């Protein structure tokens, strides 16, 4: 029994040591948040290097006791860009936890781009090791709160309605006086002079006429006020500005530029492309470029200092069956790709992506899947089943 307890304690200690040896969770390691969007379903972290620092690059590390530490670094070679939204993390409300058995990373983040309180969420992520970093793939969401939403106040009184309401109140009090005068005139206990009755009747008619005129003027005033409000709304609305996405992402479609496929599993989720540079090469990195005629050309390159590593799946693309189309008006990149890891015929898919630029490349965010054909799955036929004995 004692041996079993000692063995269990040893295994737990060993697992904790393995978790601490995970480069992602070592407090001394620093990571660059590539696309500055931590609320996306996939979070891409690349290893920190001074050469990777662009304009106000967010650099973070997973510190001890579940704390997240971050800072911004700036490269003086880049000019200021007022259109970029920078992420600020509320470190007091943010934390991380790692399950050594399931290898699941749990993040609780409160952050924003305008304030520290734009949103808050808690999610579980699977850690996917990729070229020069990690991708945290969301597997479960406990909650997501958009703190920017404000409560809507119902039945707000229009400022233009203040004056008409006061007029209506005066008219009602006048009608009340008229009703009281009628009761006095109709009382049988009082000696009434006919001349006074005529005068009272004429005064009542004049008051009623005035109330009708006032009510009519109030209605006209309301119509005029509503018409003025409508005009002011029409002036405030401006037509949307049309964005030329081809000009915005022209670097991606430059046939002279080459891109490193960050994650080798191109059939999973989003696609990340980083500009080619020799310092980014590791072992057999897929380097591609988009040609003008809608085709893709690619090759593999490696860092000569790194020896061959067995067990890595390398993607091969059937360039004759692969093509792309870009709709510059809607920012939709349609990719039809056939490829595989054991052969060129493992799978074929057609998907729509939106292009998102970040400091060190582009992210293709999947928005629609037309089809995905997995040729690796065997087709069940009658020959696969054993014949029943008679």
Image (cartoon, rainbow, N blue to C red):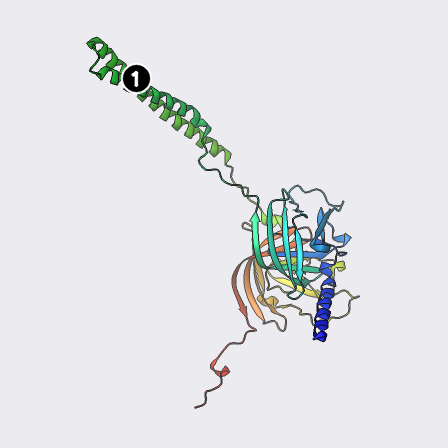
Task: From the viewer's side, name the closer residue of 2 and 88.
Answer: 2
Give the image quarter of residue 5.
Answer: bottom right
Q: Is residue 63 left or right of residue 171?
A: right
Q: Quadrant of the N terminus?
A: bottom right
Q: Residue at x 50, y 36 (%)?
A: 237
Task: From the viewer's side, name the closer residue of 294 and 173.
Answer: 173
Q: How many marks?
A: 1
Q: What residue is pinned by disc 1?
A: 207
Badge 1 crowding class, 10 Å Cα cut-off, few under 14, some 14 to 19, many 20 or more, is: some
Q: Quadrant of the C terminus?
A: bottom left
Give the image quarter of residue 308.
Answer: bottom right
Farthest bottom residue in view: 390
Q: Residue at x 56, y 49 (%)?
A: 145
Q: Position of residue 336 (x, y in %)?
A: 56, 63
Residue 290 can be seen, yes or no:
no
Q: Position of residue 109 (x, y in %)?
A: 63, 51
- SS label for mark 1: helix
Farthest front residue in view: 1
- Whether residue 13 is situated above or below residue 107 in the rendered picture: below
Residue 19 can be seen, yes or no:
yes
Give the image quarter of residue 242.
Answer: top right
Q: Is residue 132 left or right of residue 124?
A: right
Q: Position of residue 148 (x, y in %)?
A: 57, 43
Task: From the viewer's side, name the closer residue of 380 and 3.
Answer: 3
- Whether residue 351 is situated above or below residue 82 in the rendered picture: below
Q: Position of residue 106 (x, y in %)?
A: 63, 58
Farthest right residue in view: 305
Task: From the viewer's side, name the closer residue of 319 and 215.
Answer: 215
């Amino acid at each position: 029994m004692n041996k079993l307890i000692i063995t269990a304690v040893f295994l737990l200690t060993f697992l904790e040591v393995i978790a601490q040896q995970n480069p992602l969770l070592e407090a001394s390691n620093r990571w660059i948040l590539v696309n500055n969007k931590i609320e996306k379903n996939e979070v891409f972290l690349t290893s920190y290097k001074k050469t990777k620092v662009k304009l106000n690059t967010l650099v973070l590390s997973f510190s001890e006791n579940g704390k997240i530490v971050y800072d911004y670094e700036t490269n003086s070679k880049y000019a200021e860009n007022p259109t970029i939204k920078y992420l600020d993390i509320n470190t007091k409300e943010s934390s991380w936890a790692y399950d050594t058995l399931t290898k699941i990373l749990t993040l609780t983040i409160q952050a924003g781009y305008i304030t520290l309180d734009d949103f808050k969420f808690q999610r579980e992520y699977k850690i996917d090791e990729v070229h020069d970093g990690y991708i945290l793939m969301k597997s479960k969401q406990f909650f997501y709160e958009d703190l920017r939403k404000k409560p809507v106040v119902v039945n707000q009184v229009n400022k233009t309605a203040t004056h008409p309401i006061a007029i209506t109140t005066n008219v009602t009090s006048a009608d009340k006086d008229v009703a009281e005068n009628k009761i006095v005139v109709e009382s049988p206990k009082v000696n009434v002079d006919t001349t006074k009755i005529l005068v009272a009747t004429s005064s009542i008619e004049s008051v009623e006429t005035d109330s009708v005129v006032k009510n009519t003027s109030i209605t006209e005033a309301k119509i005029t006020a509503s018409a003025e409000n409508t005009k002011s709304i029409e002036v405030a609305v401006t037509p949307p500005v049309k964005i030329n996405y081809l000009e915005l992402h022209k670097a991606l479609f430059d046939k002279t530029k080459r891109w490193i496929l960050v994650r080798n599993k191109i059939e999973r989720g989003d696609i990340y492309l980083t500009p080619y540079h020799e310092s980014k090469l590791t072992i057999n990195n897929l380097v591609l470029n988009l040609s003008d005629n809608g085709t893709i050309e690619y090759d593999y390159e490696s860092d000569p200092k790194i020896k061959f590593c067995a067990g890595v799946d390398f993607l091969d693309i059937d360039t004759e069956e692969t093509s792309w189309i870009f709709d510059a008006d809607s920012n939709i990149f349609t990719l039809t790709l056939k490829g595989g890891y054991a052969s060129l015929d493992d799978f074929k898919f057609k998907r729509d992506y939106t292009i998102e630029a970040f400091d060190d490349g582009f992210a293709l965010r999947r928005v629609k899947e037309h089809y995905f054909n997995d040729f690796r799955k065997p087709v069940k036929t009658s020959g696969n089943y054993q014949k029943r004995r008679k």
